[in-house]
Image (spheres, rainbow, N blue to C red):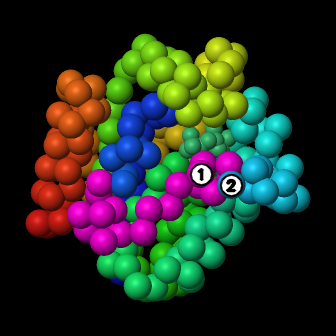
């Protein structure tokens, strides 16, 4: 099993590019945001707990998402690995992921980072709100909170993974979706070749 993280700010294109990467490399794509939205739609207790935090643009408790990740690792055994999208989101989650992988005698193969500037985050999320109707895409205040949360809590992971020597970055705003996707897949090819 190989373990990858797809990293980047909200709106970087992680969800879109994850589908292509997962298909090409037979990886199970795990998006904690999608799993949480499914919990909210099902009306589960967990979903109810997460809903107000998500709609305010805050993170949900680490224990909730870590439980989801471990459950997925235990469930999908017929794949060549996992592509984590939206997890980890802070240093504590990254440290816990290290422990979860160590328990399985595994380590991360790479962090594929897709970078876009804040102004592009805002325009892309506004467009996505019209297409997908995600509640947390609709309000400007929530979007600003998500950007703030990204810089304060998630961005420090770049240094964390650089120090571990497994951080690989590409520009996620080079042109059309196809052009951006080609860059992400080329980066993934180069990591796979290591
Ligand atoms: P996403 O679809 O990845 O943008 O996630 C949507 C929302 O779900 C985020 O703004 C957070 O509120 C929550 N969420 C997703 N992943 C995590 C995580 N790893 N830790 C905490 N909250 C998360």
Magenta region: which residues? 20-37
Task: Using the image as rendered, state which of residue 46 and residue 3 is in the foreground.
Answer: 46
Element assignment for label 1: helix
**Residue 24 falls in which quadrant of the image?**
bottom left
Q: Residue furthest front?
A: 131
Element assignment for label 2: helix
Look at the magenta stretch and give its main secondary structure: helix
- The quadrant in which the N terminus is found is bottom left
Q: Is residue 191 left or right of residue 108?
A: left
Task: Using the image as rendered, state which of residue 111 and residue 49 is in the foreground.
Answer: 49
Task: Give coordinates of residue 20: x percent, y percent.
Answer: 29, 54
**Residue 64 falls in which quadrant of the image?**
bottom right
Residue position marked by numbered label 2 in the rendering: 38
Task: Give coordinates of residue 88: x percent, y percent.
Answer: 53, 53
How far is the residue under mark 1 from the one under mark 2? 6 Å
Q: Residue at x 56, y 33 (%)?
A: 132
Bin the neighbour count of mark 1 within 10 Å (Cα to Cα): few under 14, some 14-19, many 20 and up: few
Task: Using the image as rendered, state which of residue 37 and residue 99 is in the foreground.
Answer: 37
Does the beta carbon at disc 1 come under 8 Å from ligand 1?
yes
Bin the neighbour count of mark 2 within 10 Å (Cα to Cα): few under 14, some 14-19, many 20 and up: few
Q: Residue at x 84, y 54 (%)?
A: 43
Task: Using the image as rendered, state which of residue 66 and residue 120 is in the foreground.
Answer: 120
Q: Is residue 101 visible?
A: yes
Residue position marked by numbered label 1 in the rendering: 34
Q: Is residue 67 left or right of residue 115?
A: right
């Amino acid at each position: 099993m190989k373990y990858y993280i797809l990293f980047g700010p909200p709106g970087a294109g992680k969800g879109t590019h994850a589908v292509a990467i997962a298909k090409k490399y037979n990886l199970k794509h795990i998006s904690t945001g999608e799993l949480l939205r499914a919990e909210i739609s099902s009306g589960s207790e967990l979903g109810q707990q997460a809903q107000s935090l998500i709609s305010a643009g805050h993170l949900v408790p680490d224990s909730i998402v870590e439980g989801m990740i471990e459950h997925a690792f235990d469930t999908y055994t017929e794949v060549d690995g996992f592509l984590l999208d939206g997890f980890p989101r802070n240093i504590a989650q990254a440290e816990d992921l290290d422990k979860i992988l160590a328990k399985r005698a595994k380590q991360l193969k790479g962090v594929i980072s897709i970078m876009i500037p804040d102004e592009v985050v805002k325009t892309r999320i506004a467009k996505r709100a019209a297409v997908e109707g995600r509640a947390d895409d609709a309000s400007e205040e929530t979007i600003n909170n998500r950007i703030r949360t990204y810089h304060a809590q998630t961005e420090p992971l770049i240094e964390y993974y650089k120090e571990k020597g497994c951080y690989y970055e590409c520009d996620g705003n080079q042109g059309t979706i196809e052009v951006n996707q080609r860059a992400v897949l080329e980066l993934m090819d180069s990591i796979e070749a290591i």
